[in-house]
């Protein structure tokens, strides 16, 4: 029976009160007080510290050589951390941060150190083998990174290296001639991505690359 | 219940009381200085005067406008509301009709336009004023935004006077400081509310701004452009001190930490676990992934303003940085309690 | 009575035998020699019965010998031998060859002293850095010496695991191992005399240069400008192996050995502690300036001349300032190491232009005045003629296509840079010429006093360059750049040319498909020799550049040709073939030719090299056929 106007005023006053209380809270709470800890739980996947799933004891059982006496099948079944896109991206950043790029060069082309861009891995190509090569170092010049890097960082690098070595193959061996190789990678100063083999162009024979 | 409430409220909420309520609400803005711990308050800054004046001026004008408009609105509403039971209400006109209603509209229009135009001109004048510093900057810094910390480099034409620090900027009082902004990864924004001038740090581009503190003090800054998981924990501090104090701080920062003077207690742990990411100038540690830790103990906070720089917090941070700043690039290191204590001792010697 | 007779007999025997014991028989030059000195003894017995001297100061004047990598202290690489001349060189044939058993880049110059040829192999194979002594006439292996360098050194050598040669003085051979040892070996027996550790691979240091012996001191410099190493040149006493002095290339004056005698040729090279002041605080400690190239010496002025590498971190924005004394040419007193002058052709180097190239000591008549100069083919593409008494630049002219530097201001000695090509963080600068290895890298040129021309083997490359921030982790690379090299304008990648330093122009040139990464040799027979990376060893007319002879070897050439003569007067020309080095690493090491940025960007320019050659290690020794020699000597 009554018209709506008084209701509007009540609602309006209520809203005003609400806004006042809210602002008071906003002004009162000191977000900048450095004594607060973040109460929220850690967010899921992007953290680089998911915790390694392979124990040192298991790693010790990974053979580096292709020969096992008695021809036994001794390679343990291990569960390395997943080598997903995020891990490869982190690995790419780590590759530059920790100077891997200085010896193995951009996109793993090789230089002071051997190429990581082909499928040839002197000390084994399984993720565990690559992990151990980085962690322990190797006698002909690979530093022992396990002394300074946490394991999760090394697993990220393994994920990136898997991407780097994912070259397209048309045959078991490698033919080198005036017509082979026929493709080259888009160089890293043009395109810097975690999976460089996705971008190839015609082999330039030492001339300026096409752009 | 509602009718009684309405009746009681309507009786209590007279126009005068309404205006007092609004006034009381607004008054807290003016009482802000009485509140402790409001470091991001930009109304009582130490930056350029004309910006503060403009802020207050526009705020006051806005409030006055709000008051006037609200007052008119309430007057119009409550005037008819005050006599709800009057039988003659139905016949009354809802809005008192002026003799020339259009004149009111024109008056309002002209007044609003004049005020807005005035404020616009005033704003433009202030903007032009702060486009360049009032005098030639004596100190020049380069700020590089990282996820989620600030790399600060003090520039100089003499290369041996260039040094890098992190997250805390010292400036001399009363002198403008030129700031070059760039980003190492995504877009950040450099914002120290008390000193005004929010400018983005954009990758691939160098932005320039300047800051000036006209009184000594510590001014908190914050990244003002969402930049990832720990955007909220990307704080910044600007400490304005007298010229002599600034010079003393600068000379201290230029000194290298000698490997021998720091002592070997935690040095081995630091060189092994921390040096790949952090720099301590004068030692073998030259990593650039994380902030430069040279003279770490001269800073008041760590982790870009997230924690105070005190032993307990330092230990807690090193022990589990992912708990404090999950997603940050500092990993959980594999160190035990003994190593933690040693490396903390080492860091505490970085004066 | 019997006692007296016995005594007489004894005395007589002594009188007869004693002189025999004290007489110095002709020491046969083979390893079955019994009276070999102990490892701790000082010098080995001198070859006193032979007429030849064993003193390097005398040997450098004897054209039958090739006693140091650069032939003589002036670094001319010129021989007065003229049995082989432009008329008969087309008859040149292989006299003997020797395989060093270790592939990878063969950059070393063979030495020939008193009938023995000495060669050294790179760090490869079962016996890395092995030294061989061979008979000059028939190539018999007399002895070999294998040091024990640390395998991890392979991980800190930027540009293949090379060594550029040996040195000789007073019956001793001096060797530098990749992992930083200086070793003295008895030249006759191959026994080790001393070994001294000079560098630390955990700091990223290696040693690749050929040592030089001056006044009884072995001069050795380190390598590692890409590893954030602080560069130095050390003098080691040749008898004891003790370090006599060490001059750093960066740091305070007392460590750079700058004292009262020093006077820089220009204002900006004079001042106190410039090796600190021209760097951000502490950056000089990882400032590069290594000494991995050539050292020449002027005995009259008693000054040694050498250049230093690029300053540390290719990303120049991490080291504002002139960065003294990286990319600098030093003149020092060899007795004390104190600097006399220093000139920096590339202040605040932007593109990895080391300045370790040879400084050839020549007296030239310029503007009707005889000047004591150094001819220094700069990495930056400019041919510098520098007054070697003061360090002032007399002339500087581009000897190849250069767009990174517009000119050299002769008043200030500073280059005028092309600002459009200055690298800035994250931005890819394209078409920078010359590329990072410069218009010419370490491969040494040769000077003929007969033709008065400098014979310059070099490359013709341009590059894309993109800098990035790099952290310093000791023992790992400190570069901060993505590089991609390719052929320069014209599509060819190498050139062998003759340059007139007085006329300041190119006289003739031969374009090659690949960079000419071998050294040059020129003789009084007016023949110049050089090798190409696609396995050709060539002889050309020194006056006209006409190709006179060539030989197809087993592997590409990056080594240094030398010439010497045997005891019967036969002239030999020798060079080690075996591709590798910074330019050839893609063919000799496990490097992927499809990834252009490999080998610090060199892969981009050499991707097709593996289709022409792979690694090898052969010492090739050439001579005229016997009948040709008779014809030559009959003339």
Image (cartoon, rainbow, N blue to C red):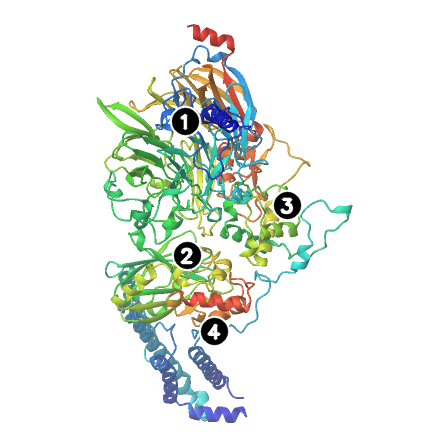
Q: Is residue C258 left or right of residue C98?
A: left
Report the residue marked by disc 4.
Answer: B312
Which quarter of the image is occupied by the N terminus of chain A? Answer: bottom right
Q: Nearer the viewer, mark 1 or mark 3?
A: 1
Q: Nearer the viewer, residue C310 or C60?
A: C60
Query: Same subunit under labels 1 and 3?
Result: no
What's the chain of the residue with tag 2?
B
Q: Residue C54 has which mark? A: 1
What's the chain of the residue with tag 4?
B
Local packing at callout 4 (Cα closer than 10 Å; few below 14, some 14-19, many 20+) is: few
What's the chain of the residue with tag 3?
A
Residue A27: x percent and y percent?
Answer: 42, 78
Q: Nearer the viewer, residue B272 or C346?
A: B272
Disc 3 to disc 4, C-alpha distance: 44 Å
Image quarter of residue C262: top left
Query: Same subunit under labels 2 and 1?
Result: no
Q: Residue B283 has which mark? A: 2
Disc 4 to disc 2, C-alpha distance: 25 Å
Residue C395: x percent and y percent?
Answer: 28, 30
Q: Nearer the viewer, residue A76 or B23?
A: A76
């Amino acid at each position: 029976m009554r018209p709506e106007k008084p209701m509007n005023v009540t609602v309006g006053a209520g809203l005003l009160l609400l806004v006042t209380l809210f602002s008071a809270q906003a002004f009162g709470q000191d977000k900048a007080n450095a004594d607060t800890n973040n109460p929220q739980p850690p967010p899921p996947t992007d953290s680089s510290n998911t915790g390694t799933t392979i124990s040192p004891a298991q790693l010790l059982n990974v053979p580096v050589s292709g020969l096992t006496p008695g021809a036994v099948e001794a390679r343990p079944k291990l569960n390395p951390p997943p080598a997903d896109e995020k891990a490869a991206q982190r690995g790419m950043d780590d590759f530059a941060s920790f100077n891997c790029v200085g010896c193995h060069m951009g996109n793993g082309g090789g230089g002071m150190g051997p190429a990581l861009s082909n499928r040839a891995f002197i000390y084994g190509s399984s993720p565990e083998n690559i992990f151990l090569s980085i962690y322990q170092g190797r006698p002909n010049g690979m530093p022992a990174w396990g002394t300074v890097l946490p394991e999760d960082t090394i697993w990220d690098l393994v994920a990136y290296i898997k991407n780097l070595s994912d070259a397209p193959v048309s045959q078991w061996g490698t033919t080198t001639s005036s017509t082979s190789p026929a493709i080259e990678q888009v160089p890293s100063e043009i395109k810097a991505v975690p999976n460089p083999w996705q971008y190839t162009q015609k082999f330039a024979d030492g001339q300026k690359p096409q752009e | 219940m509602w009718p009684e409430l309405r009746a009681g409220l309507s009786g209590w909420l007279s126009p005068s009381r309404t205006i007092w309520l609004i006034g009381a609400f607004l008054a807290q803005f003016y009482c802000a200085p009485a509140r402790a711990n409001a470091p991001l308050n930009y109304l009582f800054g130490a930056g350029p005067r004309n910006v503060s004046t403009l802020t207050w001026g526009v705020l006051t004008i806005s409030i006055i406008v709000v008051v006037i408009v609200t007052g008119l609105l309430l007057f119009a509403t409550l005037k008819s509301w005050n006599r709800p039971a009057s039988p003659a209400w139905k016949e009354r006109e809802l809005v008192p009709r002026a003799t020339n209603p259009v004149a009111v509209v024109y008056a309002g229009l002209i007044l609003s336009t004049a005020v807005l135009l005035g404020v616009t001109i005033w704003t433009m004048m202030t903007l032009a004023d702060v486009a360049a510093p009032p005098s030639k900057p004596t100190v020049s810094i380069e700020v590089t935004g990282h996820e989620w910390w600030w790399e600060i480099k003090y520039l100089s034409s003499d290369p041996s006077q260039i040094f890098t620090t992190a997250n805390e900027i010292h400036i001399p009082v009363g002198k403008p400081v030129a700031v070059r902004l760039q980003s190492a990864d995504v877009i950040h924004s450099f914002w120290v509310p008390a000193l005004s001038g929010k400018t983005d740090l954009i990758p691939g581009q160098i932005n320039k701004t300047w800051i000036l503190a006209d009184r000594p003090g510590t001014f908190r800054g914050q990244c003002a452009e969402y930049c990832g998981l720990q955007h909220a924990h990307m704080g910044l501090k600007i400490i304005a001190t007298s010229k002599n104090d600034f010079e003393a701080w600068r000379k201290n920062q230029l000194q290298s930490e000698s490997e021998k003077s720091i002592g070997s207690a935690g040095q081995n742990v630091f060189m092994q676990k921390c040096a790949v990411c952090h720099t301590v100038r004068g030692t073998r540690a030259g990593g650039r992934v994380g902030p430069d830790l040279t003279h770490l103990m001269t800073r008041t906070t760590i982790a870009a303003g997230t924690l105070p720089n005190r032993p307990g917090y330092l230990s807690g941070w090193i022990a589990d940085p992912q708990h404090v700043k999950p997603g940050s690039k500092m990993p959980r290191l594999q160190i035990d309690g003994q190593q933690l204590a040693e490396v903390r001792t080492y860091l505490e010697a970085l004066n | 009575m019997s006692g007296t007779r016995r005594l007489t007999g004894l005395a007589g025997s002594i009188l007869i035998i004693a002189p025999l014991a004290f007489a110095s028989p002709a020491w046969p030059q083979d390893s079955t020699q019994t009276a070999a000195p102990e490892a701790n003894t000082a010098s080995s017995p001198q070859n006193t019965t032979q007429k030849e001297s064993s003193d390097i100061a005398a040997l450098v004047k004897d054209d039958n010998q090739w006693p140091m990598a650069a032939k003589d202290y002036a670094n001319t690489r010129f021989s007065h031998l003229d049995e082989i001349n432009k008329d008969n060189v087309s008859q040149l044939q292989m006299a003997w060859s020797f395989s060093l058993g270790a592939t990878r880049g063969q950059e070393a110059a063979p030495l020939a002293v008193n009938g023995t040829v000495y060669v050294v192999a790179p760090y490869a194979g079962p016996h890395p850095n092995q030294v061989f002594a061979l008979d000059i006439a028939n190539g018999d292996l007399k002895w070999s010496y294998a040091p024990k360098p640390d395998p991890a050194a392979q991980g800190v050598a930027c540009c293949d695991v090379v060594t550029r040669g040996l040195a000789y003085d007073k019956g001793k051979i001096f060797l530098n191992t990749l992992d930083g040892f200086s070793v003295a070996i008895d030249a006759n027996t191959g026994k080790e005399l001393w070994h001294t550790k000079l560098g630390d691979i955990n700091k990223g240091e290696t040693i690749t240069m050929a040592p030089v012996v001056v006044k009884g001191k072995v001069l050795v410099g380190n390598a590692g400008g890409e590893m954030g190493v602080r560069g130095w040149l050390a003098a080691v006493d040749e008898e004891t192996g003790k370090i006599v002095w060490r001059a750093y290339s960066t740091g305070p004056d007392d460590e750079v050995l700058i004292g009262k005698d020093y006077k820089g040729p220009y204002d900006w090279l004079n001042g106190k502690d410039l090796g600190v002041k021209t760097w951000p605080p502490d950056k000089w400690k990882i400032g590069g300036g290594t000494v991995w190239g050539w050292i020449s010496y002027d005995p009259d002025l008693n000054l040694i001349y050498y250049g230093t590498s690029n300053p540390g971190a290719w990303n120049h924005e991490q080291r504002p300032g002139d960065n003294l004394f990286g990319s600098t040419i030093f003149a020092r007193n060899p007795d004390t190491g104190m600097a006399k002058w220093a000139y920096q052709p590339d202040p605040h180097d932007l593109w990895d232009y080391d300045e370790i190239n040879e400084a050839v000591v020549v007296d030239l008549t310029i503007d009707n005045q005889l000047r004591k100069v150094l001819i220094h083919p700069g990495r930056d593409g400019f041919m510098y003629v520098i007054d070697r008494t003061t360090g002032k630049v007399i002339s500087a002219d581009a000897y190849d296509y250069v767009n990174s530097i517009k000119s050299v201001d002769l008043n200030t000695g500073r280059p005028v840079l092309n600002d459009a090509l200055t690298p800035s963080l994250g931005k890819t600068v394209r078409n920078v010429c010359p590329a990072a290895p410069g218009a010419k890298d370490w491969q040494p040129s040769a000077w003929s006093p007969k033709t008065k021309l400098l014979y310059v083997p070099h490359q013709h490359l341009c590059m894309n360059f993109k800098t990035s921030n790099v952290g310093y982790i000791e023992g790992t690379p400190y570069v901060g750049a993505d590089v991609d090299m390719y052929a320069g304008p014209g599509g060819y990648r190498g050139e062998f040319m003759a340059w007139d330093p007085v006329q300041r122009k190119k006289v003739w040139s031969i374009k090659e498909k690949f960079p000419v990464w071998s050294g040059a040799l020129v003789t009084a027979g007016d023949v110049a020799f050089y090798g190409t990376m696609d396995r050709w060893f060539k002889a050309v007319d020194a006056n006209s550049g006409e190709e006179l002879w060539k030989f197809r070897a087993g592997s590409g050439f990056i080594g240094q040709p030398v010439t010497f003569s045997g005891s019967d007067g036969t002239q030999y020309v020798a060079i080690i073939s075996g591709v590798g080095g910074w330019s050839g690493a893609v063919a000799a090491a496990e490097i992927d030719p499809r990834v252009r940025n490999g080998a610090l960007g060199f892969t981009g320019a050499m991707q097709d090299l593996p289709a022409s050659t792979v690694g090898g290690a052969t010492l090739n020794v050439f001579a005229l056929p016997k009948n040709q020699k008779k014809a030559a000597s009959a003339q």
